[in-house]
Image: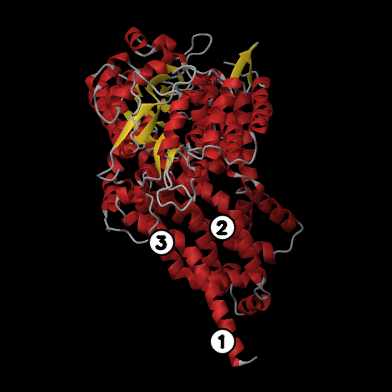
């Protein structure tokens, strides 16, 4: 018994486990036959005995064993819906599908935005993949470049091809025409404002037809910034912006300033901070430190964390927040709080970048046709409209955008829906390594810049140098879009 | 030392302890307060540890969604299997490593210690392959097996330290009375080692109870999800969260650990000390 216990302790070392895995890989690869891997050998017999012991324990405790897994497997759908309404919507759609297709049932698996990347990478590497998964266009680029995703282009119906906006398809289309995800929701960035403060200051908010220029936004912020009690410190800022994870919004806003940060030449991506990008960065930095019309509290907070400050009257405008944030205002604002929505100011153009949420099928899924049929069901006009309504985002189908609920639905739906025509793809959507670049390079440098620890020149220089280190590593691996 | 000096010293010590207790309990009190606030009050951004109006809406939401109690049950099952298995293996193994003199002992101990240098992300793919080979993916048994692999080395080292401090004369006396090795371990040493075993078991259980990554990757079906994974589902994109339900669910999730610590704190404290001094 003592010897066995010591042996078990030694074998239980993770390094031993890795060795066993290596042995499995070698054994399977030498025989080139999966069935042979299931054959008997003394070692496997010993392992099997151990498993039987474990299963007895499992049986005693009543937990699920591999016997259940042997049953016919339904299609597995990993959803990233997380708001109560959207989770319910996805579950209802799955239930509806299962009722209509009892021969091809779907199992709803709840993923999380914070862990989906690790979950999927492990699934792709081990081959134990879901059949359909929900993610976003900027991230699936990397998966696609590594060959993890199935090409959906041959399976897409003509009706879907024609109805989904071209810009949404552009966010997921590879140079060879492959499509690795069906875009079903689009993000749009807006400005949320406090109507009462605007009225008190005598400011008329911009309309969709007559947007503010950058200077007009800046002037309005100055008029809305107030020292109410006269103690010399500002009590009400004109504007605020969640700058903790600023890369995403700055990438998307840069297009209207004539920039894009990413440039592609000879098949290689590089990051360049040109005049357009500088003008955008300088605008926000100037409002923070020169005009002092933007709340400094935003430098360490996300956009959603800034919403309570809008309710409390700490600032009059929340700039560059996703259209989804309207849900928080609609559901959680104090009863007497009146708010409105307008679009980002016009710089050189009104174009902003697009990011879409997608449904994809892993290349290792053995049931691609069934999975695609389920995706077709999830993105039919009714279901897409329902998803968009629950997530407070834009549907990608023209037929959905033209529905009354999105054109005149209140809570700024009319403005948000109309903004779809200003969405365009940025070159970063095709750049392998973009996700790593965003989290490891752009966000930290922008945080330092907006905290006033480095100046614009240093931020620009570091963005170019450090970004290109990351991108070069991906391009050395031959990952191109 | 004068009485006045002693009084000041006691006051200072108690003040420091009080601050430490406040520091430790603040997150829990914060979660409790948040779980009892209405959603608009949470979003108001006003700092307060006392809810303006106490509401149980978040607890009702969590209960209505119905996943939290099932995930607690799953965590409990995986934690108990892992804890029992770890203790059953580590106890005789630590005895053997202490009492059986062999040149291989140091090698074994060094080998076991290497496990501590591995981050989970490094071994997850090979680990997954082994678990899949055993047809144990998406089962609590497979997850418990991984928890055994993960916590056994540390528990073994803990028990090894305690075991070394037990005088061999105790076993010799039992042997003279005719006790076998197994009897010596389970009838003589185990009662002496109870605090250490309690501490080791608590460590193994809490590690399993709080573990997220392996559970995320190994379990697929909704019915097998464990508590930390379930809690993560209340968070969204770009730092958003359903704060009220998340606080309520976190509070419910914390209760078993608190109860366990309350029952076992004596064992745990003396167990830690037993390994620390000769």
Question: Percent from the top left, x then y, of residue B101?
Answer: 73, 63
Q: Specify the farthest residue to the front.
A: A230
Q: Foreground residue, B54 or A275? A: A275
* Label 1 vs 2, first from the N-terminus: 1
Residue at image mark 1 = B7
Q: Which chain carries label 2?
A: B
Rendering quarter of residue B219: top left
Residue at image mark 3 = B29
Rendering quarter of residue A6: bottom right
* Label 1 vs 3, first from the N-terminus: 1
Residue at 26% in and 21% down: A407
Q: Foreground residue, A343 or B228? A: A343
Question: Percent from the top left, x then y, of residue A359?
Answer: 40, 23
The colour scheme applied to this rendered structure is secondary structure
Left of A335 or right of it: where is A321?
Answer: right
* On-image quarter of the N terminus of chain B: bottom right
């Amino acid at each position: 018994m003592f010897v066995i216990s010591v042996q078990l302790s030694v074998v239980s070392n993770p390094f031993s486990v890795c060795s066993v895995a290596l042995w499995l890989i070698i054994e399977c690869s030498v025989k080139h036959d999966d069935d042979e891997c299931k054959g008997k050998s003394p070692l496997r017999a010993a392992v099997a005995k151990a498993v039987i012991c474990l299963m007895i324990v499992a049986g005693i405790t009543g937990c699920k064993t591999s016997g259940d897994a042997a049953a016919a497997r339904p299609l597995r759908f990993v959803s990233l819906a997380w708001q109560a309404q959207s989770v319910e919507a996805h579950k209802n759609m799955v239930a509806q599908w299962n009722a209509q297709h009892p021969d091809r049932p779907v199992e709803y698996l709840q993923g999380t935005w914070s862990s989906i990347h690790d979950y999927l990478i492990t699934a792709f590497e081990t081959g134990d993949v879901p059949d359909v998964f929900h993610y976003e266009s900027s991230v699936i680029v990397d998966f696609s470049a590594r060959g993890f995703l199935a090409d959906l282009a041959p399976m897409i119906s003509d009706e879907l091809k024609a109805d989904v906006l071209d810009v949404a398809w552009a966010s997921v289309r590879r140079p060879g025409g492959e499509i690795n995800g069906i875009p079903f929701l689009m993000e749009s960035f807006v400005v949320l404002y406090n109507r009462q403060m605007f009225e008190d200051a005598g400011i008329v908010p911009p309309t969709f037809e007559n947007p503010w220029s950058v200077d007009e936004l800046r002037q309005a912020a100055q008029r809305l910034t107030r020292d109410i009690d006269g103690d010399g410190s500002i009590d009400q800022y004109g504007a605020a912006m969640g700058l903790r994870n600023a890369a995403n919004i700055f990438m998307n806003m840069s297009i209207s300033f004539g920039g894009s940060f990413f440039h592609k030449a000879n098949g290689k991506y590089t990051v360049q901070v040109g005049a357009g990008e500088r003008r955008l960065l300088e605008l926000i930095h100037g409002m923070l430190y020169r005009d002092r019309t933007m709340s400094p509290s935003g430098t360490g907070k996300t956009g959603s964390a800034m919403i309570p400050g809008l309710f409390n009257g700490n600032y009059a405008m929340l700039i560059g927040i996703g259209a989804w944030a309207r849900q928080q205002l609609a559901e959680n604002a104090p009863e007497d709080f009146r708010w409105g929505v307008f679009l980002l100011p016009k710089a050189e153009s009104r174009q902003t970048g697009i990011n879409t949420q997608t449904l994809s099928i892993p290349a290792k899924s053995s049931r691609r046709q069934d999975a695609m049929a389920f995706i077709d069901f999830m993105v039919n006009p009714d279901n897409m409209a329902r998803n968009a309504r629950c997530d407070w985002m834009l549907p990608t189908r023209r037929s959905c955008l033209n529905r009354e609920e999105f054109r005149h639905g209140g809570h700024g739906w009319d403005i948000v829906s109309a903004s779809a025509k200003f969405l365009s793809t940025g070159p970063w959507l095709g750049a392998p390594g973009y996700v790593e670049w965003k989290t490891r390079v752009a966000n930290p440098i922008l945080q330092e810049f907006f905290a006033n620890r480095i100046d614009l020149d240093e931020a620009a220089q570091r963005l170019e140098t450090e970004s290109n280190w990351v991108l070069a590593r991906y391009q050395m691996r031959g990952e191109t879009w | 030392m004068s009485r006045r000096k002693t009084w000041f010293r006691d006051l200072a010590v108690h003040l420091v302890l009080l601050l430490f207790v406040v520091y430790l309990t603040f997150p829990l009190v914060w979660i409790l307060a948040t779980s009892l606030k209405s959603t608009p009050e949470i979003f108001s951004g006003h700092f307060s540890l006392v809810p303006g109006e106490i509401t149980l809406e978040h607890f009702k939401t969590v209960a209505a969604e119905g996943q939290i109690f099932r995930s607690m049950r799953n965590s409990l099952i995986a934690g108990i299997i892992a804890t029992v298995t770890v203790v059953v293996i580590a106890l005789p193994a630590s005895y053997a490593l202490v009492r059986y003199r062999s040149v291989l002992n140091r090698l074994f101990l060094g080998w076991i210690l290497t496990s501590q240098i591995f981050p989970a992300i490094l071994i997850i793919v090979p680990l997954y392959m082994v678990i899949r080979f055993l047809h144990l993916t998406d089962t609590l048994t497979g997850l418990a097996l991984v928890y055994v692999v993960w916590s056994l080395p540390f528990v073994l080292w803990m028990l090894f330290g305690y075991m070394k401090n037990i005088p061999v004369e105790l076993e010799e006396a039992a042997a003279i009375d005719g006790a076998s090795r197994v009897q010596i371990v389970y009838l003589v040493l185990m009662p002496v080692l109870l605090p250490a075993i309690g501490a080791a078991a608590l460590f193994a259980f809490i590690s399993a109870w709080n573990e997220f990554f392996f559970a995320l990757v190994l379990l697929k079906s909704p019915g097998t999800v464990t508590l930390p994974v379930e809690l993560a589902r209340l968070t969204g994109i770009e730092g958003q969260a359903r704060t009220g339900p998340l606080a309520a669910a976190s509070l419910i999730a914390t209760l078993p650990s608190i109860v366990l610590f309350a029952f076992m704190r004596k064992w745990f404290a003396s167990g830690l000390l037993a390994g620390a001094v000769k």
